[in-house]
Image (cartoon, rainbow, N blue to C red):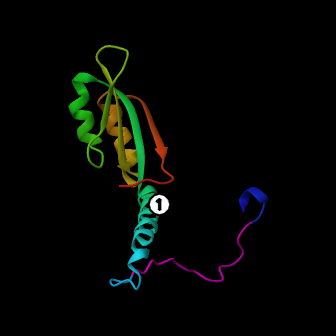
Amino acid sequence: MRAAGLHAIATLLETEAVLIKSSTPKDPAHEPLIKTIASRIAGVVAARRYVVCQYNVRRERLHDATSITPGRRAPTISPLEEDGWAAVSAMVEKSKVANIMDNLVKIGAEDILIFNLDNCRV
């Protein structure tokens, strides 16, 4: 709206979407489709909660860094062409990203990037 020069003047109705699933579906053939739709919605909801944090850190500080960004299961760690350095990528909670970045800087992490997620499967 803002891009078009518009602004809200009043709220007519506040709504929310709710997915309701029967515990005993009428047609078992629909179950795969129901699971797919639920999975897709869950992916969008999770993507709103998490971001991807990527950074470079010296290998001797890798343990400290991964304790700051443990990821949902574990961080992805890749070697860099420069000896003694690693690239780390991890999903982190969006609400904690400012503190996480501050803590990474304190231990010497560099090139810290945050990427928003549009969708994911977790």
Counting from the top left corner in percent of width and height, residue 57 is at: 32, 26
Which residue occupies the extreme right position in the image?
5
Q: Is residue 120 left or right of residue 67?
A: right
Q: Secondary structure at mark 1?
A: helix
Query: What residue does disc 1 label?
Result: 44
Q: Give the amino acid at mark 1.
A: Val
Which quarter of the rendering shows the C terminus? bottom left
Asked if residue 122 lies left or right of residue 18, the reply is: left
Looking at the picture, how far across and down is residue 10, in whole percent? 69, 78
* Picture quadrant where residue 87 is located: top left
Q: If the image is split into quadrants, where does the N terminus sit? A: bottom right
Residue 39, compared with residue 66, is above or below; it is below
Magenta span contains residue 94: no
Residue beneath the point at 21% across and 32% down: 63
Q: Is 59 on the left-hand or right-hand side of 109?
A: left
Question: Within the magenta stretch, is there residue 13?
Answer: yes
**Looking at the image, residue 40 lies above or below residue 117:** below
| Majority secondary structure in the magenta region | loop
Q: Residue at x 74, y 56 (%)?
A: 3
> Relative to 41, is 121 above or below?
above
Residues shaded magenta: 7-21
Near mark 1 (Cα within 10 A), the count class, few <14, some 14-19 or many ≥20, is some
Q: Position of residue 45 (x, y in %)?
A: 44, 63
Where residue 2 appears, as percent x and y from the top left, is 72, 59
Residue at image position (55%, 80%) is: 15
